[in-house]
Image: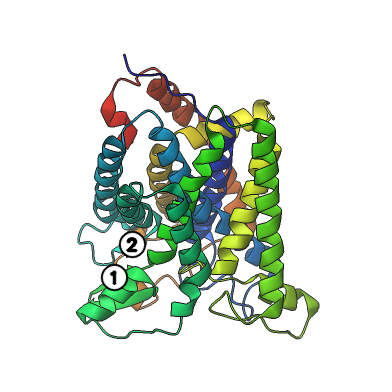
Amino acid sequence: MPAKITRIESIDILRGSVMVIMALDHVRDYFNYGSFFIDPTDLETTTPILFFTRFITHYCAPVFVFLAGTSAFLYGRNKTKSQLSKFLLSRGIWLIFMEVVVNNLIWTFDLTYSFPILQVIWAIGFSMICLSFLIYLPKKIILAIGSIIILGHNLLDNIVMQGNSFHSILWYLLHQSQALVVAPDKMILFHYPVIPWIGLMALGYCLGQLYLPDFDATLRRKWLLGMGLGAVGLFFLLRWINVYGDLVPWMVQDTKTKTILSFLNVTKYPPSLVFVLITIGPALIFLFAIENVKNSISNFFMVFGRVPFFYYFIHVLVIHVAAIAGILIFGGNWKDMILTADIFMNEKLATYGYALWIVYLVWIGIVIALYPLCKKYMIYKANNRDKWWLSYL
């Protein structure tokens, strides 16, 4: 019989919370008017409600990647370094395969794969492969590497590549978000350059030390609160100084509201230093606050946090199918929701979409609809820990 694994409920609740919020962003992608071509953080076109609808979902990817590192540490507690390394390497390769082959298909429904996108699953997979080698180093060295990457990678912002040469594509993979047209009817979006995500996963791995069984719970909560408040404080300091930490400095606007939005408009692709601070900082504070909370609400979010891989793929599929249903109901052409490169290159969905309140209604409906399925799968996983392949799902 395999050793019983005690899950950390607060980590599952945090992961589940951001994954529920993540669905809001993806519903907005498929349902909000003009969402395929309008940037919700563009101060010239956005509204405060639309901006914060996007801003709140900034917490999803960094927390997801960060906690993937923490989960890797906890998974490896009762394993040798070699066993953990092999698992991380194989799972990383598996995730990259799932991103390229499966995730792109359910996002686009395009059997020709004319517009592949490298998104968060790709970033997690690649970061896991890197972590499979980093774990052989002392934890202090891993912490130093992760910190140096997060603190220093914005020094690379001025390196900008163009074209489709080998060196350019390599740089798109590493640090520059780029849409690359490779043929008249084919393009690739390098959406999650991996350098900062590698650093973030390494830091998440180090956080796992606080959750060892013999680590004092009171001391852990002090560390979580201190690190969380410190990260938020450093965010405001760096953002106020406005010299380093983000690709785009904030600027005083013609209204106070727009100035606040400009201050908060941090760069996600790739995640800047201040982006990481304002997302991971509150996440650490959340872990501090939620540790001893146990109620029906926390249990609700915990379900999604315990089946992240399953939830991620199924929720994108359901959202995409729901978007097609919406088009059919209102008399449109369902084929418009087969998202080929041509759709984006010629802005064929520029006038498609619904009001933001409909986005919120659809989001709530989909999350509620997926809860029973996710709970059933969670119970199945818990009762079948001896099935090794479940650790990849």
Residue in the foreground of this view, choosing between 129 and 106? 129
Dot 1 corresponds to which residue? 188
Q: Vertical placement of 36 versus 44: above or below?
A: above
Q: Which residue is mark 2?
A: 118
Q: Residue at left 40%, top 34%?
A: 75
| Closer-to-camera residue (21/149) | 149
Colour scheme employed for the rendering of this structure: rainbow
Q: Position of residue 20 (x, y in %)?
A: 55, 44
Q: Quadrant of residue 1?
A: top left
- Is residue 329 visible in this depiction of the protein? no
Residue type beneath disc 2: Leu
- Which residue is located at x 60 percent, y 68 percent? 274
* Residue 82 point in image, percent of width and height: 26, 38
Q: Residue at x 53, y 72 (%)?
A: 39
Closest to the observer, 229 or 121: 229
Dot 2 crowding, Cα within 10 Å, few <14, some 14–19, many 20+: many
